[in-house]
Structure formats: structure tokens, C-alpha cells
Amino acid sequence: MTLSTPPGGDSGTGRLLWRGAEADIVADEWQGLEAVFKIRRRLEYRLSVLDDAIRLQRTVHEAQMIHAAREAGIPVPGLYYVDPGEATIVMERVAGQRVKDFVGRASPDDLGSLFHRIGADVAGMHAANITHGDLTTANMIRREGRVVYVDFGLSTHSTRVEDRAVDLRLAKETVLGAHSERSDAALKALTEGYESEAGAQCARAVMAQLRSIERRGRYARVV
Amino acid sequence: MKQYVVGIESTAHTFSASVVTSSGDILSNSKNVYSPPEGSGIHPLAAAQSHMKAAGQVLERSFSEAGVDASEVAAVAYSMGPGLGPCLRVGAVAARTLASLLQAPLVPVNHAVGHIELGCLVTRAEDPVVLLVSGGHTMVIAHSGTRWRVLGETLDLTLGQLLDQFGRHAGLSSPCGRNVEKAASESSTYLRLPYSVKGNDVSFSGLLTMAKGMLDSGRKFSDVCYSIQETAFAMVSEVCDRALAFTGKREVLVVGGVAANRRLGQMLEVMASRHSARALLTPTEYSGDCGAQIAWTGSLAYACGASVAVSEAGVRQSWRLDTVDTPWRR
């Protein structure tokens, strides 16, 4: 069933919060609750047959993964409604600040504890066989001393050490790429946080794989 | 007073020399391109031999076209890496010889940084998200702090390799991009191929395997070319899309050999318009490997005091661009 207007809400009157690469995030009410609508708009640069298939698949998949993460005790937005036909997910609105916006102004202590927390949460997801797939600091929201993880659009169910290492690598890449001036302390805390939750043995395996992936990078210093 | 810098490029199939001024006028950009036999790729030694034969002539031409005498050159820049060892060594030998002869300082340049800086010069890009797509690279890059940083890249093949390896499988000779583009423009039949974006990274190996299989099972060459382009270009466009959203930058610059593909340029223009950003497409003459990328970047680096002793001027086959400081971007 496809509903252009989900019951109890009207996505047409909402306020655009964020235009991401693949979706618009619109703030609106849903059944009296503060909600966000994640709407995967058509991407005109992609062939429509390819685009439709990707948007439908990612919408359904993302809703399933958010649910799985919640069951595993990871802070994620509550799911209200899913409309596959419109490639739309309606979920709880998380009031807080993006980690991306916080990093530049945080004290070294705050930064350390924040990334320690993130490392531990990521290890928690991995323990539940969930890899997030897009662990940039724009997809993490600080709320009441915790971090809420959003955008599970690229997440997967996986038990592979490789996938976990890829997950951490993206987190590392965005810290290096976007927050280069404060990256050393953040990366150290991230690693320690991961270890604290995953256990030394498991963390060692993932970190070793991470180094192996980095050596695979084109023109890494191998020759 | 005008200051001239000569740049020598020889990382892969192209041997090229160029003279630029310190204010960014490109006075010459001569090249000689090695082309391998049909159905095969670049043989590094054969390419190096071709470069050795061409080197003297290409250098002479670059000076005569520029109307500059070699003795007027302030510095000699060369691509130190990354690239194919035998090819790089030819350029390094030529550069060391010229620098010794002219008693001019020698400036090593990272080939990938060269692509980006030349793209910025000719398109007047100020602070772009860069898509570097060639036979050697597929990366999405932005400047942050003191370096160009990699935001996303291929986990296996480059976009150029995808097009070349598929083209060669069909019996074409490398580089195949132009022929694949031409065939693709004759089709509008889309065959579903694996679309693999992992975070900000892409993977083309599954796509290549399936595309080869389609061709072997009798699908039309033009349909497969069309489907490869639509899938692979949408993947890199999506990563650029994400990079624009994440960085908030207002320009996307395309550099590298595959920047010559018009369908890719068109997709990126549509993508950029979603962000009210501009897509800056480097003209074909300057998007592929050429001496100007080395001369211009060498000129920028030389102005900041970069140089290397002749005895230290070797080559680096593996040299990631995100390890290179860019003091000229302050």
C-alpha cells in the first residue's frame, strides 16, 4: 500500500531540516508526536529504473536495521511509520546537537569521553552483528550525555571482521578528513572505547583488519 | 619578471612536458602517448621505452611552443609518483639531466595533487570537492588543514580500469573510455548491474565481472557499455553528492582521464544543482595526464621553497596524495 500522506501527519507542510545526499529530513508532527520524515527523493542523475529499486530497497532495509539496533540496546530514533512506496520513514525527532558541530568547540576532556562513548557504542552494534556503514560525525547526535545514531541507510547484518573494520575505517576517515586538527586524541579515544566494549581479543582482530585494509588503499606505502 | 617552470610527466602511458609561468599561464603542453596493442593493457617496460624515444622531442617541442629558451627556466618539476616504476624513472632521468644541465632546482610533484591543482587553475575552482577519476585513481577529495584529504575512494578497481578492462575484454585497445562512451551513447537499454557504495567508498570488481559475463552470454556491447556507465557513474556521483552534503562546499571539480566522459559530466551537473553547487569539468586537454599538471604544481611548490637534490630525486611508485603538504594553500 502506498500513501502519499501518512496517517496522522502531513509531510507536505513540514520544515526541511536537512537535505542529505540521498534523502530529505523533514520535521513534522505525526499523530501528535514530534517526528522527522526521512524521504528518499528521486535522484535525477540516476536512471529511474535503477533509482526506484535502490530507494525502495534502502528504505525497507533501513527501517529493519533501526529496529534491530534498538533491540540491541543502541540509542537510535524510535520508528513510527514506514511507507516503502514513497520511500519514506517516519521516526522520532532526536533533539540534540550533531557530533560534527560539537567537535570543533569541545574541550579535550569532552572530546575524549565523547569518542570513547562512540567507540563503545560501535562495538555494541558490532556485537549485535550490525555494521552501521556510514559512521560519519554528521550521523551522530548528542542527547543527554549519550550519542544517538541516525541514518542506517547503508547498514548491514554482518559477522565479518572485515565489515566491522570498514565501519571503523569510515569513522576514522571522517575524523581525519573533517576534523584533522583534533584527530589524534579523538582517534585514540575511539579505539579505547571500542576495546572497552568489544574486549581486547575481538578489538585486536578488528584493528589488525583495519590496518590491513589501509594497506590495500591505492598507493599506500607498500612498494 | 616572469618566472618559468618546466614540468615533466611520465607516470603511465603519457610522456609530456609543459612550460608555465608563475602566474599560471600555460605556454605549452606537448605530449606523446604510448598505445598498447589491441586487447592488452599498458606494459610498463614497453611504455617506458616509448617514453625514452619520445623524451627529447617532447621536451624540445614544449620549449619551442612556449617560445622560451631552456636557459630561462627557474625550476624543473617532475612527477615523482605514484605510477609505474619504469615509466616514472624515464621522467626522473629526464628531469635530473635537465636540472643538472641548467643548474636549476628540481621540484618533485605528486601526480594526483598535480591533477587537482591544474583542474583548479583552469576551471578557477576555489575550494572544491574533487572527483579524481582515471586509470590510476578513483577518489573523492577535499582540502582540509594542510593537505588534500581523501573522503572516499575505490576499494578495488579504478573507474578507468573498469572501462579499460571491460573494453579490452571486448577486444578494444587501451585506453577504452572513448569507445565505451561512444557505444553507450547508441543504447538506452539498461541491464541491472551491481551498485556498490559502501559508506563513501565504491567497489567496481563485481560490476566488471558481471558486465564481462553479460557480453560473453551474447548481450549487445552497446547495451552493456550503457549499463556500466549508468551504474558506475551514478555510484561516483552519489559519493560526490554525499561529500557536498557533508562538507557544505559549493563546487565539485572533476579531474583525471575519465573527466573527458560527457555522460559523467552531465550526471555531476545534475547532482551539483541539487546543492546549488557548480560542477566544474576540466577540459580534456588538461584533465588527462599532462606536463602542465606537473609544471603548475611544481611552480606552486617552488614558490613555497620546495626542491630536492639531484641525488635524492628518485621515484615513488606508492605515494598517496593525502601525505603531501600543500603550503601554497594557506
Image: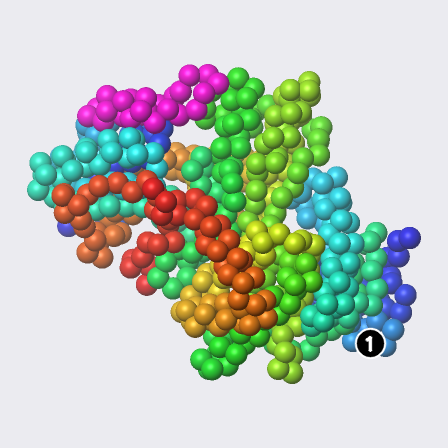
Residue drawn at the location 35% of the way across and 37% of the way down: B83
| Left or right position of B299 against B135 | left
Crowding near pointer 1: few (<14 within 10 Å), some, many (20+)?
Answer: some
Q: Quadrant of residue A52?
A: top right
Work out whether B284 lies above or below A58: above
Q: Out of B239 and B319, give the one closest to the viewer.
A: B319
> Can you give x and y, in whole percent of width and height, for residue A98 in the image?
59, 72
What span is in magenta?
B32-57
Residue drawn at the location 48% of the way across and 43% of the way down: B138
Query: Is any atom of residue B190 visible in this view?
Result: yes
Residue drawn at the location 75% of the way across and 39% of the way down: A49
Work out whether B300 lies above or below B137: below
Residue hosting label 1: A33
Work out whether A81 lies above or below B201: below
Q: Out of A11 and A168, give the one closest to the viewer.
A: A168
Q: Out of A121 and A147, give the one closest to the viewer.
A: A121
Query: Is any atom of residue B267 visible in this view?
Result: no
Mark 1 falls on what kind of element?
A: strand
| Left or right position of B269 against A30 | left
Q: Which amino acid type corresponds to the residue marked 1 in the rendered image?
A: Leu
Residue drawn at the location 89% of the way across and 69% of the way down: A8
Q: Out of A68 and A108, give the one closest to the viewer.
A: A68
Q: Chain of mark 1?
A: A
| Magenta stretch contains residue B38 | yes
| Left or right position of A77 against A103 | right
> Can you give x and y, in whole percent of width and height, for residue A206 in the image?
53, 58
Q: Quadrant of residue B77?
A: top left
Work out whether B330 lies above or below B316: below
